[in-house]
Amino acid sequence: APDFGDEAVPDRRVSGNMPIELARVLIDEFALTGDVLELACGSGSFTRELVRHARTVTAVDGSPRMLERNRREVDDSTVSYVNADIFDWQPERRYDAVFFGFWLSHVRPVTFDQFWTLVRSCLRPGGRVAFVDEDDRGTVNDDIHLVGSVPAAPRTLRDGRRFDVVKMYWDPTELQDRLSSLGWQVAVRRVGETFLYGAGT
């Protein structure tokens, strides 16, 4: 958690971090209201933008240390934190909107449909979903290789340890079509130099 987003750790050719200004513009465009669920909330870069609009935010992450960092950096009483493995977690309530930033690219192909079933179960009737991530233009920034049949990229921590992380670089049109086949009406488009933004119902 302390190393996440650290530009000084040279594990990529180009940073994959979204500029704060762009993140703010996209959250404003989503124009969310009511109770919002943020999956894989991470360090809080999007949480702090969500709380500007939402009545409440429920922030879920699998890392207790990341949740501690988020709580410290966002420091907002409207945010409730849940430490859980997203693939083992079930919502106790429904939400007006679900958001996730830079998470979908870490969902393995074999669990893609399962993840979107979870998202559906989290939404109230008429609820909306939005997400941001890197798109297929970002492949030039990473050293993608297969672990079994899963695309992965190396990540290095400050202490020198290296790990492989699942990394799916989606083409926006292909992602939109895939979601449509699952019953979603989500428009996905390219934003910035290497990012995508999706929003819909």
Image (cartoon, helix red, strand yellow):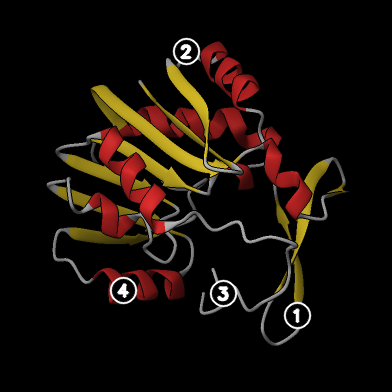
In the image, is residue 177 above or below residue 167?
above
Please state which amino acid type lies under the numbered disc 2: Gly
- Decide which of tag 3 and tag 4 comes sooner along the chain: 3
- Residues at marks 1 and 4 touching, judged by CB atoms closer than 8 Å: no
In the picture, the disc for residue 73 is 4
Q: Position of residue 67 (x, y in %)?
A: 38, 69
| SS category of the residue bearing label 2 | loop
- Pointer 2: what residue? 183
The front one of 197 and 25 is 25
- Closest to the observer, 156 or 58: 156
Separation (CA) of disc 3 from disc 1: 15 Å
Q: CA distance from mark 2 to mark 1?
A: 41 Å
Q: Is residue 179 left or right of residue 142?
A: left
Of labels 2 and 3, earlier in sequence is 3
Q: Which mark is first along the chain, 1 or 3?
A: 3
Relative to 1, say whether 42 is above or below: above
- Identify the residue position indicated by label 1 in the image: 161
Disc number at residue 108?
none
